[in-house]
Every structure is written in C-alpha cells, then in structure tokens.
Image (spheres, rainbow, N blue to C red):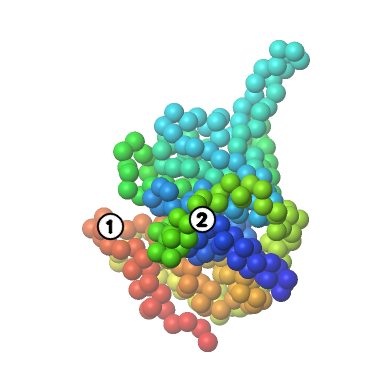
Amino acid sequence: MENGSQKINEIIEFLSGYLHGKERALRLALIAFFSKGHLLVEDLPGLGKTTLAIAVAKALDLGFGRIQCTSDLLPTDITGLSIYNKNTGEFEFRSGPVFNNIVLVDEINRATPKTQSAFIECMGEKQTTIERQTYMLPRPFFVIATQNPVEQFGTFPLPESQLDRFMMKISIGYPSRDAEKEILRGGSKRGELYTMKPMMNKEDVLAVSEDIRKRVYVSDKILDYLLAIVEATRSNKYLMAGISTRGALAIHHTARTNAYFKGRDFVIPEDITELAEYLMPHRIIFREEFEQLERKEIVQSLLDQIPAPV
C-alpha cells in the first residue's frame, strides 16, 4: 500500500511540471479515476483541460480517445456502428472512441440530448448497446467531460440524471502569476506528453484500485457521519432533492481513495469534508425560490452543522 500511494504522489509531482498551477485539479482527477468514477470539468477555454486528460492517460499508459461535441454529433459517432463489407457480404462493427480507457468529451453540453444519452449507459454500466448487441468497454474506463460555464448559445444543459453520473465536478481556474510566467517562458509542453515514458501500466492501475477497495477501512462511525451528511441534504429547506444513493457511494469511494493517496489504510472525517465541494453541489436540486444561492456555501453550512466523529 505504501508503494502504491508513493507512486501516485510521484506521478502528481512529475506531471505538475507539465501542468503548472494545476496540481489540485490533477490530484482530484486521479482521485476520481482510482475511485472508478467520472469527472466533469467546468471552466473557460484555454486553461488546460485537454492537457490534463492527456497527461493522466500517458502517465498511466492507457488508451486515450477524444470526442469533440457539436450539435450535429450522432450517438453512433460516440459508440461506433456496423458498416457493410462488400468483399465478405457481411456487416462489420467499427468501434467508436468510447472503446478507450480514458475518453475526453470536449464541450459535452454542445451535443444534443439524444447524443448525450449515448454516454449514460457507458458511464453507468461500463458497456454500450448497439444494434441490440451489448459490448463491454475496456477496464478501466474513465470519462473526462468539459463544458464552458459562460458561453451558453447553442448548448444543451446536462440533465440532473446525467450530472449524477459524474463522480466529481471541478474547475481548473486561472494559474497563479508565477505559474503563468513559467508557462510563458517555456511554452506549451503538451507535445512532450505524447513521448513521455509511462509511470504505471494497466496492471498497476487495476492493482491500486483493488488495493484501495480491499485495504482501506471505513469504520461505522465514519459511515454514520457520511449518512448524516446525506440525510441533511434530503431534509434541507433550500433543497428539493438531496444526495442520491449513487452520490453517497461516490463520497464513500473517494474518501477511501483520498486516504490511500495520503498513505493511510483508514478513513477520517477530513477525507470526506475536503472533497465535499466537488462531490455534492452538482447533485443537489434547489427549490425554485432559492436557485440563486451559492451551492458550495449551502454544502459547507450543512457540513458545519454535523459534528465529526472522534
């Protein structure tokens, strides 16, 4: 376990050289990945969302696919389709970009709802059904989707059912002045990522995920604390719907991964609270009269009201 957490921290430290000022986003992306979830990055263009996805894929030596969403994108452009081969007289299945370990879905809210729905089965069941036949997706399978929070013309907001399938929703943010100065001095290093030597392989990745599942202990006190947070979202006067069971599982899984990254084989309350702002706000539905309230502040107020176990 110590070797696994040490290796993860080495990857974060190494990739930070390519992602100046984005160490937090990198750590959160890896937590979502090793928790077997998916990541939604909501931020302005040009802040390194694509570079983040490529860096994770190359460091872990995993297959990488990219989908650029537009309003004319079709579900078969994502999942693949059967094409007639005149030489054999048969239809042959040609797989789409979802048949990769890590899939970057750029500007997911520019795809139509019909096309967005093609991701739901992929993200939830790690499989896709095409022409009445079900195909299993590769393991591990990780979706990093992006959307622009400002430019809304020609976009289709993600429904709550699809938002709930993203384990985390984060933003990268602008780099610090020093980090941006370093970027300007050295230029873009994205090209170097394609030739970097992997720091883990697929077997290592699966072993670490299994290690987290089997060896990180969650006590009953921590489970009761987690459930108290979940129940508080379901009875809050500002909220129409709180955290789902899927959301509770996401908190549970990421808390274990967070503890593992820090070299512990047990979860403490801080493993939950420090990730709450990325796990909870996109899952709660506000009552109409309170829609303008700051979601992160509501989540923090809920956490402040619940005593942490000792």
Report crowding for label 1: few under 14, some 14 to 19, many 20 or more residues within 10 A (C-alpha): few
What residue is at 44 percent from the left and 42 percent from the top?
Answer: 107
Instruction: Name the residue: 61% across, 50% down.
Output: 193
For residue 291, the mark is: 1
Q: Which corner quadrant of the image does residue 172 belong to?
A: bottom left
x and y percent of residue 105 in the render? 51, 43
Left or right: where does residue 298 sit relative to residue 256? left
The crowding category of the residue bearing disc 2, from other C-alpha atoms within 10 Å (few below 14, some 14 to 19, many at least 20), is few
Q: Locate residue 163 relative to residue 136 in the image: left or right.
A: left
Q: Which residue corresponds to the image point at 60% horizontal and 37% vertical from the top-left?
A: 97
In the image, taking residue 255 as reference, residue 61 lies left or right, namely: right
Q: Looking at the image, tell me whether mark 2 or mark 1 is earlier in sequence order.
A: 2
Disc 2 marks which amino acid? Gly
Quadrant of the rendered structure where residue 78 is? top right
Q: Which mark is residue 224?
A: none
Position above or below: 289 against 1: above
Q: Is residue 249 visible?
A: no
Residue 135 visible at all = yes
The x, y position of residue 228, in whole percent, is 46, 74
Mark 2 to mark 1: distance in Å? 43 Å
Q: Nearer the viewer, residue 209 or 133?
A: 209
Q: Position of residue 29 (x, y in %)?
A: 55, 58
**Residue lying at the far bottom of the rendered structure:** 310
- What secondary structure is found at the residue carrying circle 2? helix
**On the rendered image, what quadrant is the N terminus found in?**
bottom right
Identity of the residue drawn at 56% across and 30% down: 76
Q: Nearer the viewer, residue 203 or 305?
A: 203
Q: Is residue 216 above or below residue 42?
A: below
Secondary structure of the residue carrying numbered label 1: loop
Check disc 1 and give the amino acid type: Glu
Residue pointed to by mark 2: 186
